[in-house]
Amino acid sequence: MHKITFIPGDGIGPEISNLAKRCLESMGVQIEWEEAIAGEEALKKFNTPLPNSTIQSIKKNKVAIKGPITTPVAGGFRSVNVAMRQVLDLYVCLRPYRSFLGASSKYENIDLIVIRENSEDLYAGIEFKQGEKDTKRIIEDIQRLEGSRISLDSAISIKPISEYASKRIFRFAFEYVRRNKREKITAVHKANIMKYTDGLFLESGREISKQYPEIEFEDRIVDNMCMQLILKPQKYDVLVLPNLYGDIVSDLCAGLVGGLGMSPGANIGDDVALFEPTHGSAPKYKGKNKVNPTAMLLSAALMLRYLKENTAADRLEKAIQEVIKEGKIVTYDLGGSAGTREMGEEIIRHTLHATR
Ligand code: NAD
């Protein structure tokens, strides 16, 4: 019996996460769910978007699955998603992007893995607000220490990249490639401009690659990488990126396989893993029975693999593939008119056939 923390999420979160839960239950995977809340509901109930009880539940069960959570733009609380990754030290964001036959996409035969460093970079959320005393002090210190003039009316974000975090993400990536019989790692960076931060990231990758001589290692500058992914995505295998580029390139890759509705994800640490789709809470579709449940269900399949429930994971992925290939009961983004619920039910039905 697996004990798993279940966080429904905000916006479209509950619609898709409850479907994933039902899907795993109907396949007979032995799971005891422990429901915990985060985001808007937690803010109302506990006066904090990320209650300690939720963190404790994940720490105790070591595996969690969540729907997306809304983050207010500028002002309001900081991202609960980022906070969870930091507090639980989920330093890997793993996102597979695979073409599904029948999914409306301009590309075929995509099979990319994005491994995004999850703990530092501009995403660390270290920011200094415009006009405040500390911000002015930092601006003056920078001018004194480094010589650059920064306008005094600036806001400042800090981009920390460490050797420790860079090496551990590359170590994870090389081990992943070895375990999953993949072939090549491409490190993505902007080390030509950010020589110290991105330079350190790249150098760390090169260092670690020496321990894995059988795995091909190359690098690309992030802007060129974006163009290459549009022109010839099939040439790439596993991409390793610092946090911010990882975030942006993930969505680009989602576009290659039919959009955010098709893109699952996992946040992984040494001891704990949290599974969630790449997409956000799409508030405009909240309660409209509209969005594609596939990304959430594929995230559940990733979780099953993490739990070594490979047969169930295979069944679920096969069911998703069949429903998309048939193309009859699929959501708007796949060219259909079915709702979230109808597509989800159809996938559940297909997982049951797969047992016969
Ligand atoms: P979003 O991913 O929620 O939605 C962008 C657009 O993508 C949607 O309007 C919709 O057209 C499409 N889309 C997303 N999910 C889809 C699905 N399952 N099926 C079909 N189409 C889908 O991005 P956003 O609008 O920038 O963000 C909304 C909120 O979600 C923000 O508060 C943001 O901070 C948050 N967010 C949370 C997470 C997370 O919980 N991990 C991740 C990203 C964004």
Image (cartoon, helix red, strand yellow):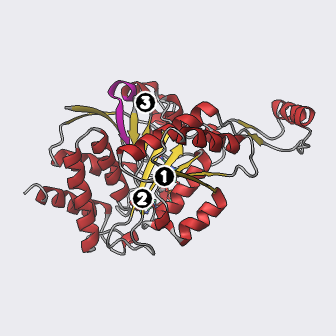
Location of residue 289 in the rendering, given as x and y in whole percent from the top left corner: 34, 61
Q: Are marks 1 and 2 in contact (CB under 8 Å)?
A: yes
Residue found at x 26% / y 45%: 21
Residue found at x 27% / y 71%: 325
Q: Which residues are magenta?
A: 58-66
The answer to whether residue 227 is left or right of residue 212 is right
- Residue 63 within the magenta-colored segment of the rendering: yes
Q: Is residue 284 above or below residue 120?
A: below
Q: Is residue 53 above or below residue 129?
A: above
Label 3 to label 1, Cα distance in Å?
A: 18 Å
| Closer-to-camera residue (16/108) | 108
What is the three-letter code of the residue carrying label 2? Tyr
What is the three-letter code of the residue carrying label 3? Asp
Sort mark 1 into few (<14), some (14-19) or many (20+) by Cα contacts within 10 Å: many
The answer to whether residue 340 is left or right of residue 107 is left
Label 1 to label 2, Cα distance in Å?
A: 8 Å
On the image, numbered disc 1 is attached to which residue? 114
What is the three-letter code of the residue carrying label 1? Val
On the image, numbered disc 3 is attached to which residue? 270
Location of residue 3 in the rendering, given as x and y in whole percent from the top left corner: 26, 31
On the image, numbered disc 2 is attached to which residue? 97
The answer to whether residue 189 is left or right of residue 6 is right
Label whose residue precedes the other's in the sequence (3 or 1): 1
Quadrant the C terminus occupies: bottom left
Label whose residue precedes the other's in the sequence (1 or 2): 2
